[in-house]
Image (cartoon, rainbow, N blue to C red):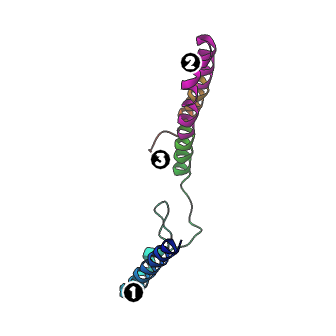
Amino acid sequence: MILLTNIFLLIMLISNIMMFLSIVLSKKSFSDREKCSPFECGFDPKSSARMPFSLHFFLITVIFLIFDVEIALIFPIIPLFKLVNFFFWTKISTFFILILLIGLYHEWNQNMLNWTN
């Protein structure tokens, strides 16, 4: 037990020394503050926060999330193939893919998939 405590203390000591040396030896300047500022979607972090947001970028992001979740929902259907009969599995899979195709058709009609303005 004492050996384990000594090893733990040694690890804590080494990690604290390394963090202290990193803080002391690192070169800091005023321009490094920009590196620490949040950066999202190509906006300049030093400009106004009330800039208009591209709705097209938002819609593409939503489409990506929908199809990303779709993959997560398709994976459990694959093992289901061995547990239920073939026609029930086919109905579930066809219904699921039909819903996705209807959503894709709607997005296509709304010109969400076009990158031109």
- Give the overall secondary structure of the magenta segment: helix
The relative height of residue 24 versus residue 93 in the rendered view (above or below) is below
Contact flag, marks 1 and 2 (Cβ < 8 Å)? no
**Magenta part of the protein: which range?**
68-96
Q: Using a 10 Å C-alpha cutoff, classify the residue at mark 2 as few (fewer than 14 neighbours), some (14 to 19) or many (20 or more).
A: few
Disc on res. 82 = 2
Quadrant hosting residue 72? top right
The numbered disc on residue 76 is none
Q: Quadrant of the N terminus?
A: bottom right
Q: Secondary structure at mark 3?
A: loop
Q: Position of residue 32 (x, y in %)?
A: 41, 80
* Residue 20 appears in the figure: yes
Residue 67 point in image, percent of width and height: 53, 37
Vertical position of residue 84 compared to residue 103: above or below:
above
Residue at mark 1: 29
Q: CA distance from mark 2 to mark 3?
A: 48 Å
Residue 81 part of the magenta-drawn span: yes
Q: Which quadrant holds residue 69?
A: top right
- Name the residue carrying label 3: 117
Q: CA distance from mark 1 to mark 2?
A: 62 Å
Q: Is 47 or 87 nearer to us in this picture?
A: 87
State the residue in front, 107 or 39.
39
Type of amino acid at the residue the image marks with label 2:
Lys
Among the two numbered marks 2 and 3 on one chain, the one whose residue lies closer to the N terminus = 2
Q: Please tell me whether mark 3 or mark 1 is closer to you in this view.
A: 1
Residue 93 lies, in percent from the top left, at 58, 21
Q: Position of residue 7 (x, y in %)?
A: 46, 74
In this rendering, which labeled residue sits more in front, label 2 or label 3? 2
Callout 1: few (<14), some (14-19), or many (20+) C-alpha neighbours within 10 Å? few
